[in-house]
Amino acid sequence: MLAASCCDRRMCVCPGPRRIGYSFRSVKCLTGSWAIPVRSSRLPLLSDAMPAPAHLFPLIRNCEIGRICSTVCYCHRKHLCCFSSHFAHGHFRCAPQRKFAALCRPKENFNQFIHARDYASTPQRFYLTPPQVNSILKANEYSFKVPEFDGKNISSVLGFDSNQLPANAPIEDRRSAATCLQTRGMLLGVFDGHAGCACAQAVSERLFYYIAVSLLPHETLLEIENAVESGRALLPILQWHKHPNDYFSKEASKLYFNSLRTYWQELIDLNSGETTDVKEALINAFKRLDNDISLEAQVGDSNSFLNYLVLRVAFSGATACVAHVDGVDLHVANTGDSRAMLGVQEEDGSWSAINLSYDHNAQNEHEVERVKMEHPKSEEKSLVKQDRLLGLLMPFRAFGDVKFKWSIELQKRVVESGPDQLNDNEYTKFIPPNYHTPPYLTAEPEVIHHKLRPQDKFLVLATDGLWETMHRQDVARIVGEYLTGVHHQQPIAVGGYKVTLGQMHGLLTERRARISSVFEDQNAATHLIRHAVGNNEFGTVDHERLSKMLSLPEELARMYRDDITIIVVQFNSHVVGACQNEEL
């Protein structure tokens, strides 16, 4: 669908205040009173201090919540709004925030469910076992180790671990990793989609090819073009490192190739004879891919499936955070609010974090000023409302999202001439308020260059689903201790809670058990997700909490967290040190 899902926290017709957590409120809903999440400064997810009514867990177990509550009108961290798949032809629905934090609307007749509580008459709790939890957490994990040559690793990258944990159904995040074969270096990236997964999927497939082509020397570009002209086999550009779930769209491969070929033909014609600058190549690749996404949607395709696909890609959106590692040169190109963080081991063995990207949203004052400078002063008050671009979009930079880039006339023409699915969709026909001087959105990345040092041990690329739940310093410590196996114990902080001696003993016992079992995770990204989802108020992984969070059905999971996608890149300190000495 082109429309934003009911729990899309990025695009919201009814912007509202920031939400920081949830508590539970009893609401009458068909089966009687049961708990639903509402705003709170804490997140006691069905904790023992506030037990859930008995109806909730049997409902979760029997998947009845999906039937009874077909539409949960709640926008994570933001205002209540939805655009549910229940309304396939697109009717915006907005729930007043003062009434409920969720709405329960049955798909079928009320009387069909009037006796739904009969089978849940006694209090019960259903938790996932540790093996079940591990099975869920490890379902999408992937690891790659850089091969050695003559028993030596000559790359500055030892390898990487990646993983994803969905909250949306289907997941809107994507990830990519590849080795550049015609130039040096490795590319890694995370992509966070909104208003669907179409744009994130397309960018995850295509962006690395645009970057690789941008980095190729003129002679190699000519060789590739001559091979295409003569029908010979092409030189491989990238070696992909993909999980089986990380697929490519075969139907669009020819269209994507033709657009890429047009790009390298233009690079051949514009050859200046100068050595390609990595920063410039990254910026050009991002901008050119976004331009091609827009152009493909305007031109359309005679194939009805492809025509609808390119429109879905263009009308949805995606942020991107990409790293290019070549020797000691690390470049991070970021568009949107995913982040890159460098893990540094200090001389005393402790861990610190260095930001290698900046969020492009309303919390970034420089970004707000940039947007205001690009538009007339008469629009200053309407450009950013409720921390959103034009009151609607959270990231200020993104791929796709042509509703914030095209003129009103172009939008109407494309929608009216498009397929019925597009023309009947209220979202695609909706024009943002105060829309006077487009484009308001750009995909141009902000690029940061960092020279690797021996103390720089790893890089974390992650979508905002991780950073919403964890501080970068905690991320650096957890990953660093996992990779080295050395744990620097900090005093247990209770955050103002009244803790008995027995409870403190329990916390210390849990911490000791956690250290002894830390190697149950063979993947650093999985280990980080375990902490992001299962950490309690004391900063320790609580299995009961983790089990409850992973047990939530699709309709509820998005209320508590976003999709989480993580790549952890481990650097080779010996190679980095040797390269550093050579440069000196």
Image (tube, rainbow, N blue to C red):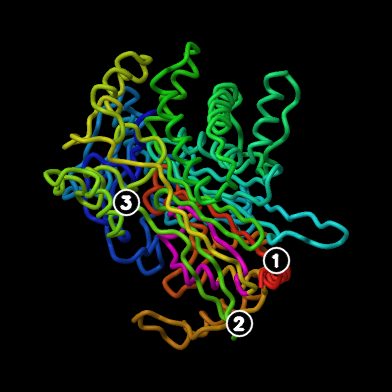
The kind of residue on which mark 3 rests is Trp
**In the displayed structure image, the side of residue 151 where residue 292 appears, left or right:** left
Q: Few, some or many C-alpha atoms within 10 Å of disc 1 (few <14, some 14-19, many ≥20)?
A: many
Observer-nearest of 53 and 233: 233
Residue 78 is labelled as none
Residue 572 is labelled as 1
Query: Is residue 488 in sight in this rendering?
Result: yes
Residue drawn at point x = 61 percent, y = 53 percent: 162
Residue drawn at point x = 75 percent, y = 25 percent: 233
Name the residue at the left extreme.
378
| Residue 458 on the magenta segment | yes
Q: Secondary structure at mark 2?
A: loop
Pointer 2 residue: 349
Among the two numbered marks 1 and 3 on one chain, the one whose residue lies closer to the N terminus: 3
Q: Position of residue 520 (x, y in %)?
A: 68, 64
Name the residue at the right extreme.
150
What is the total number of numbered labels drawn onto the structure image? 3
Magenta residues, start to end? 455-477
Q: Position of residue 40 (x, y in %)?
A: 28, 62
Pointer 3 residue: 34
Q: Secondary structure at mark 1?
A: loop
Quarter of the figure that contains the N terminus: top left
Among the two numbered marks 3 and 2 on one chain, the one whose residue lies closer to the N terminus: 3
Question: Based on the displayed image, in which of its 4 quarters is residue 23 positioned?
Answer: bottom left
**In the displayed structure image, the side of residue 96 where residue 109 appears, left or right:** right
Q: Position of residue 415 (x, y in %)?
A: 31, 19
